[in-house]
Image (cartoon, rainbow, N blue to C red):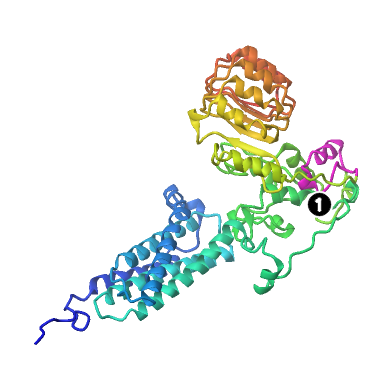
Amino acid sequence: MSTEIDLDEHPAKTKRPYFLTFVGLLTIAGLISLPFVAGEPDGDKMPDIVRFLGHFHPFILHLPIGIFVLILCQEFVALFSRHKPYRSILPAFLGAASAVTAMLTGFLLYQGGGFEGSELVEDHLWGGLAFACAAVLTFIVKIWSAAPGSSQALYRILVLASVGVMTYASHDGASITHGKDYLTEYAPDSIRKLLGLEPKEKTEEIPVKPLEEQIVYADIVQPILNKRCVQCHKEGKSKGKFRMDSYEMLVKGGKEGDGIEPGNAEDSNIVYRTELDEDDEEHMPPEGKKDIEDHELAIIKWWISEGADPEKTVADLDLPDEIREAIGKLDRSISKGGDAGTGDKPKANTPSDELRAKVAELSKDFPGGLTFESQSTSNLTFTGVSLRKNLTDDLFAKLGSVIPKMVTVDLSASSVTDASVALLASATDLRMIRLSETGITDAAIDTLVKLQKLESVNFYGTKVTDEGVKKLSALPNLKRLYLWQTDVTPAAIEELQKALPEVEIVTGI
């Protein structure tokens, strides 16, 4: 008589996982109660540690996504193979733990302020909470079904449900970051039809209106706001409860009060915040975003001072010569036309296939360093921050064919010398250059003074001298100059400041 025992038919007696079940259910209860206990977010009252931890959310959220996709694949393989089901509870535990961590950091990010009043953010918050709870419940069911012979049906159903909720929450999160139509923006009409979306609008050439016929808000002011502000002040991402994607929302303002005061530009919040010192935490745009140009701000202030009417045309308002000139300086992509009042068609500045191919090829030597300023322009930005001292004159010379397209260049803390700066002579549209802590000398300045569009130059920690920097007075558009820890004397700085009274000279004093 055989004495073998089939463990699947006669499972061993094991301790019931009551403690882990209790902890799991307590976690679910805590997660559900969290939004009610914390109340409405108020970023102004939140300590910095809340914002610090919250900013880890975009990094952590990918961990539970990867784990649950792995679990789903494991169960799919086990379901359609002769292999026994995976009994280990470790994947389910890691999935639940990472989901809870992602939810908590996301909640801290939400409490840190900047997303209040957004229905999309609220949906993402509750979607993330539902996923975290589903992940914990999946773990609880797994520890009860881990014993040999136990059914895996309920566990598999919960895995599938968790992945479904995770997908929904992830889609909302992507919509907050990239916009609601991020996935479908370039979908062909056949796919859009399957998804129940409207066909893409056919682009037609619209004649450019003469300047006097343009509506000041719609044709001039709003495009400036779209470029500088709307990315952080729109539906789904209204920082400070302030949206700037429509006239009504712009006037209404946010937590700080009205956005604009028609007839009073100086006291309007959008002007006040823009004119704050860059070191001020309330300065807008925030650090890392390109500041609004002086001519753009002048146009906005003029429009507000003239009453901020959303319907009036340029001809309806008093148009000073300096504002006419400022409108003429607007990028083609902003002003919707050519030179102000000429009726010329805008000149396309989109990157050619040849330029895209060059950038892609050069990116092998400069990973993440060479990028287009935007999707609709051939202007390039370059940073050698990741290369640091490995960026030499010989390596930088490889960029020679695309240097004419560069508008910002950061060579900080690299090994470049005056030879690399000499190559920038062809970058006639260069607006900003950082040469801090490099080996450049006054010879580099001989090249820079030829770049008439330069607005910001950083010589921090270099060997430039009085003789060199005095030549910078020839730059008509210079706005900011960094001379901290250089060989330039206070007397020379004082003389330069007299020659360039509108330029901010940073000396560290």
Instruction: Examine the structure image and report whether residue 329 is included in the region drawn in magenta.
Output: yes
Residue designated by label 1: 219
Labels in figure, total: 1
Relative to 42, 445 lies left or right: right
**Along the line of sight, which residue is nearer the eye, 223 or 386?**
386
Quarter of the image holding residue 154? bottom left
The answer, for residue 133, to whether it is visible in the render is no
Relative to 52, 384 lies left or right: right
Query: Residue 236 at x, y = what percent?
Result: 60, 61
- Please report the residue visible at 59 percent of the width from the left and 17 percent of the height from the top: 441
Query: Residue 74 at x, y = what percent?
Result: 37, 69
- Please report the residue visible at 54 percent of the width from the left and 37 percent of the height from the top: 365
- Residue 23 in the image: above or below residue 301: below
**Along the line of sight, which residue is nearer the eye, 402 or 2?**
2
- Please report the residue visible at 36 percent of the width from the left and 81 percent of the height from the top: 153
- Residue 282 in the image: above or below residue 201: above
Question: Furthest-left residue in view?
Answer: 1
Question: Furthest-bottom residue in view?
Answer: 1
**Along the line of sight, which residue is nearer the eye, 500 or 470?**
470
Near mark 1 (Cα within 10 A), the count class, few <14, some 14-19 or many ≥20, is: some
As helix, strand or loop, the secondary structure at mark 1 comes to helix
Query: Residue 78 at x, y = what percent?
Result: 36, 74
- Residue 415 in the image: above or below residue 246: above
Query: Residue 265 at x, y = what percent?
Result: 74, 44
The amino acid type found where label 1 is placed reads Asp
Quadrant containing the N terminus in the rendered view = bottom left
The answer, for residue 186, to whether it is visible in the render is yes
Instruction: Examine the structure image and report whether residue 482 is included in the region drawn in magenta.
Output: no
Q: Which residues are magenta?
A: 319-342
Quarter of the image holding residue 175? bottom right
